[in-house]
């Protein structure tokens, strides 16, 4: 009928961010992501912030469709505002925010209108560290270290080998930098502009972006088809 807008769905993500990597360390949570936004296969945007604080106790990182991430941030703004309006001296912790996000993602998936993101939610409340993730169809879990996108395949093996619960802040940052360097070498959507954030009982700190030191003279980088019989 005229005048009735037809239902719209995100059939394919347009502007996307790549991997997010997060770990628990001795005092809290550390999270890292690059600042690239890809329009299709073109690295169109170089200053997209994909790590945001949520309320007093949580830190959220997202890969996937940037506009859907902005929509999720609007949902969370409403959630935190509603929680604050009770003025009861309590506030939502990271576990509650993560549970909320799992319900939102699964609900949208069931409506065949998913939010095209994989989310990492970390935080600290009353000295308890929490780190979990949820993907676009609602699959979720908690762990001592998590990653999205290609980070699941390239960064988590490194974390399984080198992570331990007594990491200092400096050791945690060094470990995240190692993961992000591997992703920069292997992920075409990665950009060499990294942002690291931490959250502790004292609050959230989002550090200024920086570039990693890289080395591109490996023989496999110079001659990638050597020994690959029948390759282009």
Image: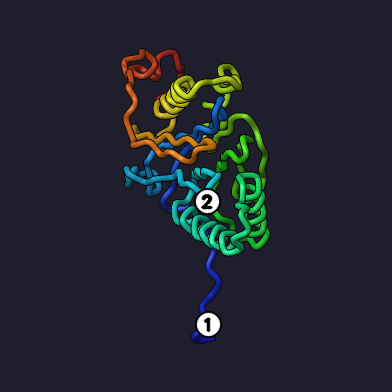
Q: Which mark is residue 55?
A: 2
Q: CA distance from mark 2 to mark 1?
A: 38 Å
Of 162 and 67, the residue lying toward us: 162
Quadrant in which the N terminus appears:
bottom right
Mark 2 against mark 1, which lies toward the viewer? Answer: 2
Point 61% across, 22% down: residue:
165
The residue labelled by disc 1 is: 4
Label 2: how many Cα within 10 Å (few below 14, some 14–19, many 20+): many
Q: Looking at the image, which residue is at 67% across and 39% down?
A: 141
Instruction: Using the rendered image of the protein, determine whether residue 137 is visible from the camera's viewpoint.
Output: no
The quadrant the C terminus occupies is: top left
Where residue 71 sits: x, y (%)?
Answer: 49, 59
Of residues 154 and 170, the one drawn nearer to the viewer in this rendering: 170
**Quarter-of-image position of residue 170:** top left
Classify residue 87 by image quadrant.
Answer: bottom right
Circle 1 SS class: loop
Q: In this rendering, is residue 161 above or below 199?
A: above
């Amino acid at each position: 009928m005229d005048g009735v807008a037809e239902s719209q769905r995100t059939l394919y993500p347009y502007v996307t961010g790549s991997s997010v990597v997060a770990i628990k360390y001795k005092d809290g949570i550390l999270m890292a992501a690059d600042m690239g936004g890809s329009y299709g296969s073109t690295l169109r945007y170089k200053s997209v912030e994909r790590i945001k604080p949520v309320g007093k106790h949580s830190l959220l990182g997202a890969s996937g469709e940037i506009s859907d991430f902005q929509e999720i941030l609007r949902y969370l703004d409403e959630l935190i505002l509603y929680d604050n309006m009770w003025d009861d001296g309590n506030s939502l912790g990271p576990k509650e925010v993560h549970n909320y996000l799992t319900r939102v993602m699964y609900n949208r998936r069931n409506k065949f209108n998913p939010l095209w993101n994989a989310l990492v939610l970390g935080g600290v409340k009353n000295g308890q560290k929490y780190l979990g993730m949820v993907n676009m169809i609602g699959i979720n879990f908690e762990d001592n270290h998590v990653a999205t996108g290609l980070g699941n395949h390239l960064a988590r093996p490194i974390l399984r080998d080198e992570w331990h619960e007594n990491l200092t802040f400096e050791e945690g940052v060094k470990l995240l930098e190692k993961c992000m360097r591997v992703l920069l070498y292997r992920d075409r959507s990665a950009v060499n502009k990294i942002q690291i954030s931490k959250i502790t009982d004292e609050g959230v700190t989002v550090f200024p972006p920086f570039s990693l030191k890289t080395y591109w003279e490996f023989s496999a980088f110079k001659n990638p088809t050597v020994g690959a019989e029948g390759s282009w």
